[in-house]
């Protein structure tokens, strides 16, 4: 039974473990990034240099690289055709900066090559946004008014958010693989490549945690919707 004396036990069962994992993943990626931010990159390569090198080698000289505010706010914007690197990455010559920048350049290459999973992720973003906003209200309304069909619609809509996180995994893993391959081809040492892998592996765990959280919330909504159906 999802509620007991006004307390929602489905949250503890399905969501809390995933949230704890997500908190650990965020702590891990920040501590790993900070650790390797203190390790100088070879040949004084900055984040900008690494991204520019990968872009140019793939014929993407039209993709711009800009600095953006914040820490670990790095991303590729396909609409503006620009890679935005955070202040701790753009002009910093560290192993962490090189790894993160190379990863974002990998996303730009994915878009240029028409990488199929990224097409799926882009296509479902509007549905995901709608589903994330409406899912919980619809399920709660279904429970409040004993309307199982409303709760069912909410669960289905939130399923799009789960699908988004699921598709995100191969997109992020592939971008990291492209980054590591490009760094290996750039001629830097095996040790530098291994260190960059550690940074990207820590970052990848945050996406695994996001998927786990989405699945936990989906199972929680499903449990609540089933209660609405029984009532």
Image (cartoon, rainbow, N blue to C red):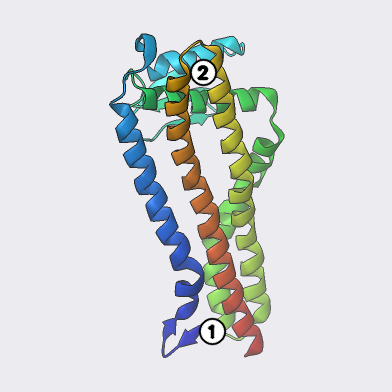
Q: Residue at the left extreme? A: 38
Along the line of sight, which residue is nearer the eye, 206 or 163? 206
Q: Residue at the front extreme? A: 191
Q: Report which residue position mark 1 lands on.
A: 144
Q: Give x and y (percent) for residue 120.
A: 69, 41
Taking the spot 65% from the left edge, 47% from the top edge, the residue there is 124
Q: Report which residue position mark 2 lands on.
A: 183
Q: In this view, does 13 lie above or below 61?
A: below
Q: Give x and y (percent) for residue 81.
A: 54, 23
Q: What element carries label 1?
A: helix
Q: Give x and y (percent) for residue 206.
A: 46, 46
Quadrant of the snapshot with the C terminus: bottom right
Q: Which of marks 1 and 2 is in front?
A: 2
Along the line of sight, which residue is nearer the eye, 24 or 62? 24
Q: Distance between the residues labelled 1 and 2?
A: 55 Å
Residue 62: in sight, yes or no? no
Q: Give x and y (percent) for residue 227.
A: 60, 84
Numbered badge on residue 153: none
Taking the spot 52% from the left edge, 70% from the top edge, the residue there is 137
Quadrant of the snapshot with the N terminus: bottom right
Categorize mark 2 by other alpha carbons within 10 Å: few (<14), some (14-19), many (20+).
many
């Amino acid at each position: 039974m999802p509620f007991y004396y006004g307390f929602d036990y489905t949250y503890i069962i399905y969501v809390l473990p995933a949230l704890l994992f997500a908190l650990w993943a965020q702590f891990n990626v920040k501590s790993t990034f900070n650790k390797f931010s203190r390790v100088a990159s070879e040949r004084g390569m900055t984040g900008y240099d690494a991204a520019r090198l990968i872009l140019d080698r793939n014929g993407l000289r039209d993709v711009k690289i800009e600095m953006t505010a914040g820490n670990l706010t790095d991303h590729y914007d396909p609409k503006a055709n620009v890679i935005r690197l955070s202040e701790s990455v753009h002009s910093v010559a560290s192993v962490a900066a090189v790894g993160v920048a190379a990863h974002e350049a990998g996303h730009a290459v994915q878009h240029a090559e028409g990488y199929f999973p990224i097409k799926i992720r882009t296509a479902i973003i509007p549905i995901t946004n709608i589903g994330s906003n409406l899912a919980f209200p619809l399920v709660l309304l279904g429970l409040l008014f004993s309307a199982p069909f409303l709760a069912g619609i909410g669960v289905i809509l939130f399923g799009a958010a789960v699908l988004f996180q699921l598709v995100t995994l191969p997109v992020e893993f592939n971008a990291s693989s492209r980054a590591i391959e490009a760094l290996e081809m750039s001629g830097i040492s095996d040790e530098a490549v291994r260190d960059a892998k550690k940074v990207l592996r820590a970052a990848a765990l945050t996406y695994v945690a996001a998927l786990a959280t989405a699945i936990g919330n989906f199972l929680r909504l499903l449990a609540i919707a089933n209660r609405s159906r029984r009532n």
